[in-house]
Amino acid sequence: MKPKQIVKIIVDISMTILLLLLMAYSLVGEAAHEWLGIGTFVLFILHHVLNNKWSRSLLNGRYTPFRILQTVLVALALASMLGSMVSGIMISRYAFAFLPISGGRGWARTLHMLSAYWGFVFISLHLGLHWSTMMNMTKRMFKMPSAIRSWTVRAVGLLIAGYGAYAFVKREIGSYMLLRIQFVFFNFEEPLIYFLLDYIAVMGLFVLIGHYSTHILNLFCKGGKPQ
């Protein structure tokens, strides 16, 4: 594996871990949340720098349904990340407290919540679009293919996604995304690991949706024959 590819994997894994910790917000502490947000934004920029070949080719070539979906998700994830960063700076009480910002905190908090929850979903879907590539890289680590291993992975993935659907409702994520609830509730007596496991499952749900969306697109684009 090339050094650049290794760096890409490290950046993506680090960004995913930080994203999950960011969703814990008050459970990790407000000061830590702000610094984790800055770190995530830096990694997000680095991710795009490392994948600048894709960005440079935006105006070239034919746009297939998969490419359209991929581009839309990238644009939405970027908008969510920018929304999170701008609103985060406006309501900052630690990392950017030195800035002479006054007013607008009410709508900034609303934007921050919307950007965070929608961004979490968009990035998870984006991961799902590239899940086949990641799985192919993993398969190269094994010398012999195994049908049992493949079906076991699929079964585990479905179980995680199934629990993720339950956790999505349990954590009222949809209500936050639609602003039906405008203040995020945290149970401070709950161990952080339980919170993170629920959000990992929710991420798994949308990764699975993104992954199988590519198969559905390929099925229709190839005249009923999967790619």
Image (tube, rainbow, N blue to C red):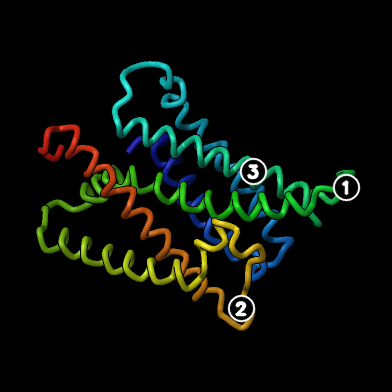
Q: Give how far across and how far down residue 92 sits, in percent.
A: 78, 53
Q: Give how far across and how far down residue 149 sits, in percent.
A: 16, 62
Kindly state the secondary structure of the residue where label 3 is placed. Answer: helix
The residue that mark 2 highlights is 187
Name the quadrant containing residue 162: bottom left
- Specify the farthest residue to the bottom: 189
Q: Is residue 65 above or below residue 160?
A: above
Q: What is the three-letter code of the residue carrying label 2?
A: Asn
Kindly state the secondary structure of the residue where label 2 is placed. Answer: loop
Name the quadrant containing residue 185: bottom right
Q: Earlier in the sequence, mark 1 or mark 2?
A: 1
Q: What is the three-letter code of the residue carrying label 1?
A: Ser
Instruction: Name the residue: 50% across, 57% down.
Output: 17
Q: Give how far across and how far down residue 129 sits, in percent.
A: 33, 43
Mark number, residue 83: 3
Q: Give how far across and how far down residue 169 sits, in percent.
A: 45, 69
Instruction: Name the residue: 84% across, 51% down.
Output: 97
The residue that mark 1 highlights is 102
